[in-house]
Amino acid sequence: MSSDYEPVFKRSKWGTNRYAYNPHNPVGLALIVISLALVVVMLVMMGNRVGPFAPPAHESSSVPSTPDHHWSVPSTDTGPGVGTYPSPSAVGDGTAER
């Protein structure tokens, strides 16, 4: 084996046990270029909201027309004062005798 052999992955020089692509190896350089190209394509797709980042299409047949979802159930409490706030005179001004 020749002494100029370069591995595809090398240990990171940042003091961790992680490996990084080696740009001195042709396969490592190709992996770097491919990774960067994929990141650029994904960012463009996110910015344009296309592909897997497209908003969901609203089909009229799959969405119910009445609000009968579990989070929109109307309240069954119909007692006096429901939905009203107490008047300021009933609350007081906070200076009650102690």
Image (cartoon, rainbow, N blue to C red):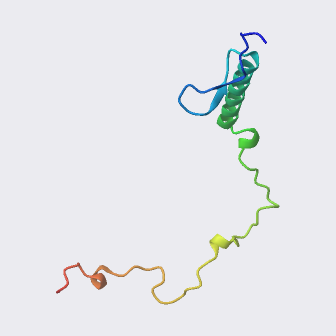
Q: Nearer the viewer, residue 81 or 49?
A: 49
Query: Image quadrant of residue 41?
Result: top right
Q: Position of residue 48 (x, y in %)?
A: 68, 35
Residue sitting at x 23%, y 78% = 93
Along the horizontal axis of the image, is 74 left or right of 25?
A: left
Q: Nearer the viewer, residue 56 or 19?
A: 19
The residue lying furthest to the left in this view is 97
Q: Nearer the viewer, residue 4 or 63?
A: 4
So how many labels did they put on this image? 0
From the image, which quarter does the C terminus lie in?
bottom left
Residue sitting at x 48%, y 83% = 82
The residue lying furthest to the right in this view is 61
Q: Position of residue 34 (x, y in %)?
A: 74, 24
Along the horizontal axis of the image, is 86 left or right of 61?
A: left
Query: Image quadrant of residue 97?
Result: bottom left
Q: Nearer the viewer, residue 25 or 92?
A: 25
The residue lying furthest to the bottom in this view is 79
Q: Determine whether 69 is above or below 90 in the image.
A: above
Q: Position of residue 67 (x, y in %)?
A: 69, 70
Residue sitting at x 79%, y 59% = 60
Q: Position of residue 85 (x, y in %)?
A: 40, 79
Q: Determine whether 18 is above or below 30 in the image.
A: below
Residue sitting at x 67%, y 72% = 70
Query: Image quadrant of residue 1?
Result: top right
Q: Determine whether 18 is above or below 95 in the image.
A: above
